[in-house]
Amino acid sequence: MNIPYVVEERPDSGLTNGKLGVWLFLASEVMLFGALFSTYIILRTGAVDWPHGELNVWLGMANTFILIGSSVTMVMAWASLKMHDFGKHRLYLTLTFVLAAVFLVNKYFEYSDHLSRGEGPWHSTFLAIYYTLTGLHGLHIIGGMIVMAYLLGPGAALY
């Protein structure tokens, strides 16, 4: 039995099932994070007092560069795969995995510093939003790392 629209495009959307699934997943991510950022904006604008200097700017800047770098290496992994250059694909995917791990290690140190000072999500509205957004983002990164580990490990022989 053949599953329709796996290879050929659907007539209603012009996409294959796989591409449509990825677009739907991305749309759900945009809605989830959009709702969380909207919540942040509403709480921030309605707050009488908002903390300043709570976060380590240098660590945040380093994590921003790490995330941008991992985005570039992921795009390069995809482009290498499209060009059937499996060696480069594996290299870029490995670099993406390593950058994700470095990001999570930095986030661990940042969380540890806050929690050692008693600044957990219960401490303030700001930290509750901060932990929710960054924690969910961390789970997103861990999910990506699991997929990358599968593609770099035994699953690599499947494609």
Image (spheres, grey):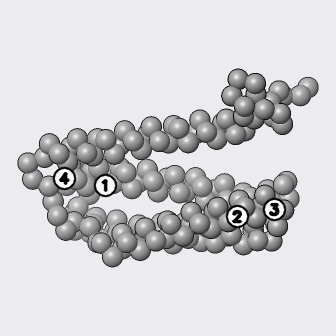
Secondary structure beneath label 1: helix
According to the picture, the residue beneath numbered tag 3 turns out to be 83
Q: Amino acid at mark 4?
A: Ser
Task: Return the x and y of residue 140 as percentages of the image width and height.
Answer: 52, 52
According to the picture, the residue beneath numbered tag 1 turns out to be 130
Q: Which label sits in the foreground, 4 or 3?
A: 3
Q: Is residue 143 above or below residue 15?
A: below
Tell me, yes or no, whether the two marked residues, 2 and 3, touch with CB atoms within 8 Å: no
Rendered image: mark on residue 77: 2
Q: Which label sits in the foreground, 2 or 3?
A: 3
Name the quadrant containing residue 152.
bottom right
Pointer 4 local density, CA inside 10 Å: few below 14, some 14–19, many at least 20: few
Give the position of the C terminus as an image quadrant. bottom right
Q: Which label's residue is closer to the chain start, 2 or 3?
A: 2
In the depicted view, which residue is nearer to us: 111 or 65?
Answer: 65
Q: CA distance from mark 2 to mark 4?
A: 40 Å
In the depicted view, which residue is nearer to us: 117 or 19?
Answer: 19
Task: Return the x and y of residue 96 as percentages of the image width and height.
Answer: 61, 67
Pointer 3 local density, CA inside 10 Å: few below 14, some 14–19, many at least 20: few
User: Is there any visible trace of residue 17 in the rendered image?
Assistant: no
Q: Which label's residue is closer to the chain start, 4 or 3?
A: 3
Q: Is residue 130 left or right of residue 118?
A: right
Q: Is residue 19 above or below residue 60?
A: above
The residue drawn where x is 9% and y is 53% is 49
Q: Which label's residue is closer to the chain start, 1 or 4?
A: 4
Q: Which label's residue is closer to the chain start, 2 or 4?
A: 2
The residue drawn where x is 59% and y is 71% is 98
According to the picture, the residue beneath numbered tag 4 turns out to be 124
The residue drawn where x is 34% and y is 45% is 37
Which residue in the rendered view is the most extreme toward the right?
1
Q: Amino acid at mark 3?
A: Met
Name the quadrant containing residue 24.
top right
